[in-house]
Image (cartoon, rainbow, N blue to C red):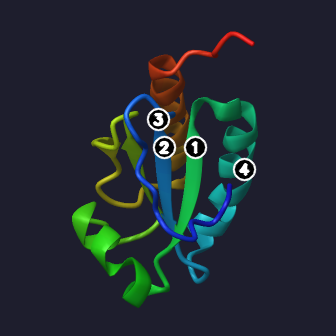
Amino acid sequence: CPAAAELKLPAAGQAPSILWFTSKACPLCQRLGGDVRQAAAAVGGRCELLQVDSDDEARWAPELLHYKVSAVPAFVLLDNQGYAVAATTRPQPYEAMRSVLRAMVAQAIEERPPQPP
């Protein structure tokens, strides 16, 4: 899952995105890292997963406020128009967060089926 250098919202018709708000000090974030990398590898180009380091509050304050992220880890699913269509409201136990990630990935790739070669 690439770290977001800057957030570029999807242009119309592009792949949906999942924003993953994390912190280096968050043990649950670290534990979810493998699941996020695995999901990113599995979706091909149908969905983009971007890691947003909430430790850098000065840089990401607008996004943290806009998506109402008050605690990490947090996931926000953006549709192919750049609108937030699903989000976690608070951190949950590992298995629940993993299930949320899987559901968001499934919703994102359902919205953007594989393109023919």
**Mark 4–mark 2 distance (CA, rounded to whole Å):** 14 Å
What SS does tag 3 mark?
Answer: helix
Crowd rating for badge 3 (residues with CA inside 10 Å; few <14, some 14–19, many 20+): many
Q: Are marks 2 and 3 in contact (CB under 8 Å)?
A: no
Amino acid type at image mark 3:
Met
**Mark 4–mark 1 distance (CA, rounded to whole Å):** 11 Å
Q: Can residue 2 be seen here? A: yes
Find disc 4 in the rendering and name its residue: 37
Find disc 2 in the rendering and name its residue: 17
> Image point 75% across, 39% down: which residue?
41
Q: Is residue 54 above or below residue 32?
A: below
Q: Which mark is residue 104?
A: 3
What SS does tag 1 mark?
Answer: strand
Quadrant (top left/top right/bottom left/bottom right) for the C terminus: top right
The residue closer to the viewer here, 30 or 111, is: 111
**Mark 4–mark 3 distance (CA, rounded to whole Å):** 14 Å
Q: Are marks 2 and 1 in contact (CB under 8 Å)?
A: yes
Find disc 1 in the rendering and name its residue: 48
> Image point 45% across, 26% down: which residue?
107
Q: Are marks 4 and 3 in contact (CB under 8 Å)?
A: no
Point out the tag, 4 or 2, that comes first from the N-terminus.
2
Q: Can residue 70 be seen here? A: no
Point out the tag, 4 or 1, that comes first from the N-terminus.
4
**Mark 1–mark 3 distance (CA, rounded to whole Å):** 11 Å
What SS does tag 2 mark?
Answer: strand
Identify the residue at the far top of this view: 116
> Image point 51% across, 34% down: which residue?
15
Amino acid type at image mark 2:
Ser
Crowd rating for badge 2 (residues with CA inside 10 Å; few <14, some 14–19, many 20+): many
